[in-house]
Amino acid sequence: EAIALANDSIYGLAAGIFTENVEWAMKFAREAEAGNLHVNWGSQWRVDLMPYGGLKESGFGKEGPKYAVQEMSELKMVVFHLNS
């Protein structure tokens, strides 16, 4: 019921659950429609190497050094065949 209630929102930045039951935590992780999922911890914690961003109407893309560069870049592959 809690997952359905949370998923009913147009936003999806973060969601959290406090439980000692690993099965419930995994069900939450599979079904919650949020970009960041926290089990037994609040949403104020993250490491810069972790992608941070939401789903639905909670923003565009991910933040964090690597992900910010990707969002501001256009990835291209260039292949050279040089006669040597």
Image (tube, rainbow, N blue to C red):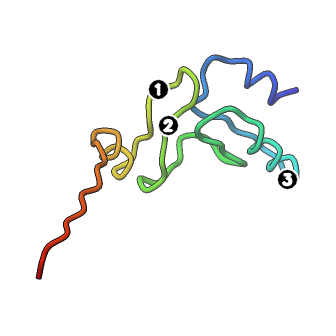
Q: Crowding at label 2, few (<14), some or many (≥20) Cα neighbours within 10 Å?
A: some
* Residue on which disc 1 sits: 59
Badge 3 marks a residue whose secondary structure is loop
Badge 1 marks a residue whose secondary structure is loop
In front: 44, or 33?
A: 33
In front: 72, or 47?
A: 72
Task: Tell me if label 2 and label 1 are in contact, CB under 8 Å.
Answer: yes
Badge 2 amino acid:
Gly
Residue furthest to the left? 84
Badge 3 amino acid:
Glu
Answer with mark 1 or mark 3, whichever residue precedes in sequence. Answer: 3
* Residue on which disc 2 sits: 53
Query: Which corner quadrant of the image does residue 54 belong to?
Result: top right
Q: Nearer the viewer, mark 2 or mark 3?
A: 2
Q: CA distance from mark 2 to mark 3?
A: 26 Å
Answer with mark 2 or mark 3, whichever residue precedes in sequence. Answer: 3
Q: Residue at x 85, y 53 (%)?
A: 20
Q: Nearer the viewer, mark 1 or mark 3?
A: 1
Badge 1 amino acid:
Gly
Image coordinates for residue 14, horizontal then vertical, percent: 61, 34
In front: 41, or 58?
A: 58
Image coordinates for residue 24, horizontal then vertical, percent: 86, 46
> Does residue 22 appear to the left or right of 46 in the view shown?
right
Above or below: residue 10 compared with residue 1: above
Query: Which corner quadrant of the image does residue 3 belong to?
Result: top right
* Residue on which disc 3 sits: 20
Residue furthest to the bottom? 84
Answer with mark 2 or mark 1, whichever residue precedes in sequence. Answer: 2
Q: Residue at x 77, y 37 (%)?
A: 31
